[in-house]
Image (cartoon, rainbow, N blue to C red):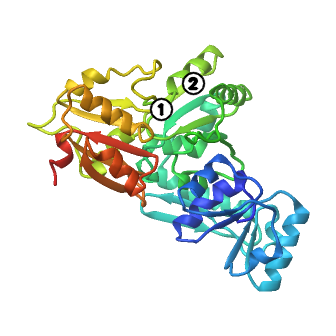
Amino acid sequence: MVGGGAVATRRLPALLAAGADVHVVSPELTPALHAYVESGRITWTARRFEPADVAGAWLIQVAVDDVEAAEQISVEADKSGTFCVRADDRHAATAWTPAVARRDDITVAVTDSGDRRRAMAVRDAISTALETATAEAADIKGTVALVGSGPGDPELITVKGRRLLALADVVVADRLVPGMLLDELREDVELVDASKIPYGPSVAQEEINRVLVDRARAGKFVVRLKGGDPFVFGRGGEEVVACTRAGVPVLVVPGVTSSIAAPALAGIPVTHRGVAHEFTVVSGHVPPESELSLVDWSALARARGTLVILMGLKNLPKIAERLVADGKSAGTPAAVVQEGSTSTQRVLRSTLGEVAGAVAEAGIRPPAVVVLGDVVNELG
């Protein structure tokens, strides 16, 4: 993959889903692509393309808007007999990316060597028929939809969320949204990467609010695509306030939150008859001793139900220490679910007293959900 911008961000998920070993050559990357690098799913060379980059490649995806640079890459690919997909000029390419629609267990791929728009039209017609969409795009122009995309598996977005995504003119997406959903967007959709990688590149919330209002006022239908549920530590409330103050109508489409889904897919029910009659979901992004923390950790230490902690890996040692100090047993069953619902899901089981060390030793990384309580061991 040559290029690290929006086009590369959209094309990469399909390559990874197909099992490709992807190497990106680009001086810079979008925050979403940085996340793939940090998770080890792709490799990256931080410079401009060089002829030697073609060596050993089966396919080259050119995702740059510099015509001269793209032509140089095409020439080098042709010399080595390597397939080359050109995002800037499909007629100069030796391979083409089909227009793809994925609905449940059906994948439709349409290609037309003469007219890309015709292929997209056929794809869209089939996709619409599969979805049996009834909403008219004209009815939602100038509107913002806050759509929860679920915990990571693209099939866990709601039917309504997927239908609205297919109608979007603009999509403002976070880092944790399923990448395959972005690959299905129409070619003319504006994709705004609002990734918020923990402790890395970020886009200010104020700028996100501005983009939502600006595009909606321009008559666009804007989908704010958020991981999990928009209102579970997703700042959905702030975005609703910003839009309504600007006179922009807002649709809210709840999503499947990882606080429940990730434990469930790891075989951990957050409630279980005779074991837990309550569960509490807290954010662990602020350490317990911080004056910014709004969590009553002492009360949670006394509670008998299940405790689910999101965004808590960095502060897990301090959180575990505080809970034990406030009276929670160090032997309380604990589990950590990394990238729940995805093909790279990992589950670690331990105890409250040992979980922080076990996480460090196992190399567990965000996004991850921490679960504390007897339900951890209830199903096995």
State whether residue 94 appears in this view.
no
Which mark, by number, is residue 289?
A: none
Q: CA distance from mark 1 to mark 2?
A: 9 Å
Say if 278 sits above or below 175 in the image. above
Circle 2 crowding by C-alpha within 10 Å: few under 14, some 14–19, many from 20:
many
Above or below for 244 versus 146: above
Sequence-wise first label, 1 or 2: 1
Residue 107: image x %, image y %? Answer: 50, 65
Between 375 and 163, the residue placed more toward the observer is 375
Q: Nearer the viewer, residue 50 or 239?
A: 50
Q: Where does the image place residue 295, in percent across and percent down from the top left?
A: 36, 22
Q: Secondary structure at mark 2?
A: helix
Residue shown at 64%/46% (left/top)? 31
The quadrant where residue 352 appears: top left
Say which quarter of the image contains residue 218: top right
Q: Is residue 261 left or right of residue 73?
A: left
Residue 335 position (above or below residue 105): above
Helix, strand or loop at disc 1? loop
Location of residue 288 in the rendering, given as x and y in whole percent from the top left corner: 39, 26
Side of 153 where 279 appears, left or right: left
Residue 40 position, x and y percent, is 54, 61
Residue 77: tell me if it is visible. Answer: yes
Q: Amino acid at mark 2?
A: Glu
Amino acid under disc 1:
Pro
Q: Nearer the viewer, residue 38 or 264?
A: 38
Quarter of the figure that contains the N terminus: bottom right
- Name the residue carrying label 1: 230
Q: Residue furthest right?
A: 68
* Residue occupying the point 51% across, 50% down: 178
Residue at point 79% right, 77% down? 52
Q: Residue under label 2, please give it.
A: 239
